[in-house]
Amino acid sequence: MASTSQIHDFHPPIAPSGLYWVVPVPVGGVELDGDGKSVTLAMRDVAVIDQPRWPALDASATPAKMSFKMVWKSTGEHVLYEDAARQFRFEGTRAVCQMEAQVEVPSIGFSWKSDPLASSSAAFAIVGNETNGRYYG
């Protein structure tokens, strides 16, 4: 059942190939701290669409832009998720993660900004390496 209170849904447009919710990260968009325990992903003015009725097939899409910053900090606690039957492995560490974001829909004069990075937290985060498919072995 669709939410009756949803007003905006921001996501990258679906590519002609069918790939969705993926955008290229520009050079310098990802920074690894010198000790390798902290990763920052920061992007400005990413082209997205505002599609309030998504995933309805007839949902209209309005051009929008999003800027955000996410910071993951490793706790050092080792994590291994592996499913050989599905050729999937993730190895890394648990992490704490914080994010701040803002969006803008210029054509309707709408903008929104989250609380600052320092006031956010995630219930679950991990950082590490994933291997799957033909690279699994």
Image (cartoon, rainbow, N blue to C red):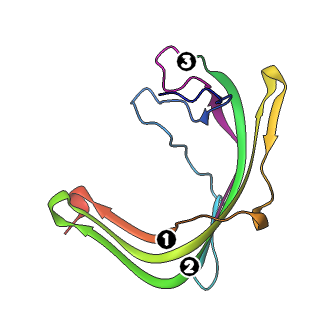
Q: Secondary structure at mark 1?
A: strand
Circle 1 crowding by C-alpha within 10 Å: few under 14, some 14–19, many from 20: many
Q: CA distance from mark 1 to mark 3?
A: 34 Å
Residue at 65% from the left image edge and 29% from the top image edge: 5
**Amino acid type, callout 1:** Val
Residue beneath label 1, please?
Answer: 127
CA gap between label 2 and label 1 equals 7 Å
Q: In the image, what residue occupies the spot 54% across and 30% down?
A: 13
Q: Are marks 1 and 3 in contact (CB under 8 Å)?
A: no
Residue at disc 2, secondary structure: strand
Quadrant of residue 137 in the image?
bottom left
Q: Earlier in the sequence, mark 2 or mark 3?
A: 3
User: What is the magenta range?
Assistant: 40-58
Q: Work out whether residue 22 can be spotted.
A: yes
- Confirm or deny contact between disc 2 and disc 3 (CB under 8 A): no
For residue 74, the mark is 2
Residue at the image point whose x is 55% and y is 43% from the top:
23
Q: Which mark is residue 58?
A: none
Instruction: Pinpoint residue 44: horizontal percent, then vertical percent.
Output: 73, 47
- For label 3, count other residues whose C-alpha is less than 10 Å away and answer few (under 14), some (14-19) or many (20+): few
| Picture quadrant of residue 103 | top right
Mark earlier in primary sequence (1, 3): 3
Q: Residue furthest right?
A: 109
| Residue closest to the eye, 7 or 83 | 7
Q: Label 3 is placed on what type of residue?
A: Ala
11, above or below 122, in the image:
above
Q: In the displayed structure, would residue 30 be above or below residue 51?
A: below
The residue pinned by badge 3 equals 59
